[in-house]
Amino acid sequence: MSLPLIIGLSAVIVAADTQRPVTLVTRRDASLPALPFGAFDPVNHRTFELSLRGWVREQTGFELGYVEQLYTFGDRGRETPDAHLSSAPGMARVISVSYLALTPEAAEIDTSFDANWRNWYAFFPWEDHRNGRPRLIDAEIAPQLKSWAAGQADRLDRARLAFGFDGHAWIEERVLERYELLYEAGLVAECARDSGLPSQRPHFGEPMASDHRRILATAISRLRGKLKYRPVLFELMPERFTLSALQRTCEALLGLRLHKQNFRRALDKAELLEGTGAMETSTGGRPAELFRFRRELLRRRIVTGVATPGRRIE
């Protein structure tokens, strides 16, 4: 028997400032936050992207700018019912095509929409190392993973590599790998929900509807990696910014502290920025020059991302 196939479209919309990275979420039921999501209608929607923009506008009032396709998700059993798929047959298989959207400002959302900006570290509290390695990892996550991996060397090796314990380094891009490991170990609420079984283990991080935390983890992994080889950081910055604001925003996204002098030397070498001659004085401290991204470079040559040297300061 063939199953009906539904194509869903989801958007991870990211903004960031010097303090936190945020993503725009809606509510799919009374409690769980969700990414903007809707079904693709092949009759009425000319393209996936136009359909996605329409769903985001309808659910949040937000107008998408920079967008790129992220990944296609189709695992059986990892999606839950959605109001925008209410007319779909009960046994339909949902394929979710996800997109990553970047915006330089977390624009205020009209209160008529059940949507708001959320700090992505609420969903992944083990990912923010700006103030040192989170105690949660070694005090709670590592013991639980070691208990789950007992007697199985491959599981233990995966846990060590993912979370950087027992002498292994922390790799910031492994966000999805870490979430998937916690899911497999039954340490996130979505696992118990999807299996239909109560869990005796603690659950880490705030859950999301369906498989949306998995999609968000994929987006964070992609963005953290891409910062280093494409100039996407500047899609999250205002037209003019100080070097300190640029560094702090980059740190917020990576969840790591950067070496100030090395970071600025790398910027100088890449020749990505141009001083405007204007000064930022609103902070009350010493005036700092405002810079702009040399966007015209994109038409002339391949432009790399922002180097992140000296990344770990504990």
Image (cartoon, grey):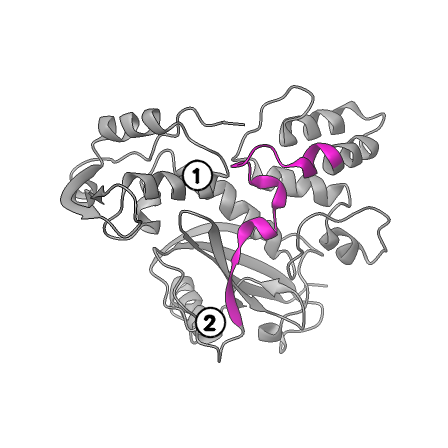
- Residue 241 at what x, y percent from top left? 26, 47
Apparent side of residue 118 relative to residue 88 in the rendered image (left or right): left
Residue 117 circle label: none
Q: Tell me which residue sits at (75%, 45%) in the image.
A: 187
> Residue shown at 85%/25% (left/top)?
151
Q: Is residue 155 magenta?
A: no
Residue ID for mark 2: 60
Quarter of the picture holding the C terminus: top right
In the rendered image, the residue lying farthest to the top is 167
In the image, what residue type sits under mark 2?
Thr
In this rendering, the label closer to the viewer, 1 or 2: 1
**Residue 122 magenta-highlighted:** yes
- Mark 1: which secondary structure? helix
Q: Quadrant of the N terminus?
A: bottom right
Count residues near mark 2 (Cα–Cα under 10 Å), then give few for <14, some for 14-19, many for 20+.
many
| 117 and 5: which is toward the camera | 117
Tell me which segment is drawn in magenta. 115-139
Q: Quadrant of residue 246?
A: top left
Q: Residue 286, image x and y in percent?
A: 26, 41
Q: Position of residue 129 (x, y in %)?
A: 55, 36
Pointer 1 residue: 251
Kind of residue at disc 1: Glu
Q: Decide: is 145 above or below 113.
A: above
Horizontally, is 169 left or right of 269 in the view? right
Q: Nearer the viewer, residue 48 or 281?
A: 281
Q: Is residue 68 visible?
A: yes
Question: Do tag 1 and tag 2 residues touch (Cβ < 8 Å)?
Answer: no
x%, y% of residue 233? Answer: 35, 44
